[in-house]
Amino acid sequence: MTVPDPGSRVPVLALEGVSKSFGAVRALRGVSLELFGGEVHALAGENGAGKSTLIKVLAGVHRPDAGSVLLDGSPLEFAGPADARDAGVAVIYQEPTLFPDLSVAENIFMGRQPRRSLGRVDHRGVRAAASALFARLGVVMDPDRPARGLSIADQQLVEIAKALSFDARVLIMDEPTAALTGSEVARLFSVVRTLREQGAAVLFISHRLEEVFELCQRVTTLRDGAWVASEPVEGLTESDLVERMVGRTLDELYPKQAAEVGEVALEVSRLTREGVFTDVSFTVRSGEIVGLAGLVGAGRSEVARAVFGVDRWDAGSVKVSGRELRPGSPSLAMAAGIALVPEDRRAQGLVMEMTIERNIGLSGLKETSKAGLISRRAERDRAVDWATKLQVKYARLGDLVGTLSGGNQQKVVLAKWLATKPSVLIVDEPTRGIDVGTKAEVHRLLSQLAAEGVAVLMISSDLPEILGMADRVLVMHEGRIAAEIPRDQASEQSVMAAATGVRTKGSAS
């Protein structure tokens, strides 16, 4: 699609020189942005670059300290989110919040239902209006269906329909694809393109750079709260965009250090859990990063959970430095030197209602307590030490861990487990949902740990990450190890062939 010349049009919504501070933290510094009708505009930047604050300024949640918000070229002030909504600005969040016991149609028109005589709700009119909105979006959805049980993708469509019911002219989509499958992403993109063709201005935020290039016509990049560039996507490369976001090139995203490979630290032999995975065998040596690849549902995370003792296995064995582990005991796995950074950091890696300091200290309660009482000084010293080593960005260690960005939450999970000084580190999707700059930091840390002699088993769905960081690649297919591929022979084609069950030269027998 050809991008019209912005100079010939008036933006629907714009920011001019907007600044916003929270105490000593300058979240936005003189940022400008123009959103035009009939265009999908990407907002790019690392965690902490100011994207969330910018969204909240546009949505009326925050008032800027300086600068202007303009609607159709005229300055205005949003006293709150209701003002922004009335001006035609809607935000579609990653995880929508619908009333689960109401129907889809009732959620769309909550508090605004058409009325019949005597003030009664016109249920037929509500259903018809909801059906018309979905038809406008080009999707099929039963307006009488209860919201409870809807997928995240369907909930987002309900939120988009609700926005259209308010005559929204600007839709802000904040990481809308993070929890969606490939087919759901394709459907969402189709809806966004329909909205664009109908003249809406869409602001699209995603850590997945390939989505920016597939969907968007223009991109604005922020770094450290400041505007870096606003430019057409056409003609840009991923490397160009990464360099604008983080100040370094894409080549630096996988800083692989040379490491001396030592003795076998983890040995998994013929591990089987009925109905989940079968006859899984592999080794990881000290100083080595072994990548575990495969399609969703291949059994990768389940193998990691069994090795760590979260789930019991039915047959086989796990040995750490030659010592066999008893199945189903995470405490024994930890005592043997295994650490597991889980895939879902919020649900399984952190206690969101606890502080940063307490989360880091959870894995070391024996070391920081005496006679059953936790030493606050020891706990704080431990937290300060590891938060500094991993460069966690926080205001106070006493803040709730939920106040941190996704990348910094991931660092807290890593800090919690690295504080145990493991000999074997299992990391499941270590960079999912975090920006490219933090990805580079996590990759550098994993490479440094391997150089220090730690055996690293890295599970990832990100093929460039696997190829960039792993010394060997194990590929799972339907609960079995389908191939073991050396680094110098690993490619996207060879890994995907094994992951989909195609026999290759490197396939396991």
Image (cartoon, grey):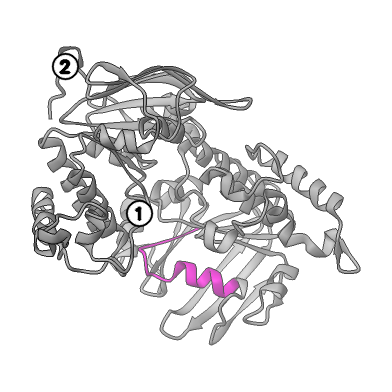
Instruction: Quadrant for the N terminus, please.
Output: top left
- Residue labelled with disc 2: 9
Q: Which is more toward the observer, 243 or 47?
A: 47
Q: Is residue 356 magenta?
A: no
Residue 414, position as x, y percentages in the image: 63, 52
Residue drawn at 39 percent across, 26 percent down:
221
Q: Does 269 sit left or right of 146 as displayed?
A: right
Label 1 neighbour load within 10 Å: few <14, some 14-19, many 20+: some
Instruction: Give the label on residue 161, or none.
Output: none
Residue lying farthest to the right in this orientation: 371
Residue 371, visible in the rendered structure:
yes
Q: Give the residue type that dot 1 points to.
A: Pro
- Residue labelled with disc 1: 96
Q: Which is more toward the observer, 38 or 498?
A: 38
Q: Is residue 301 magenta?
A: yes
Instruction: Quadrant for the C terminus, please.
Output: bottom left
Q: Give the residue type that dot 2 points to.
A: Arg
Q: Reply above or below: 440 against 223.
A: below
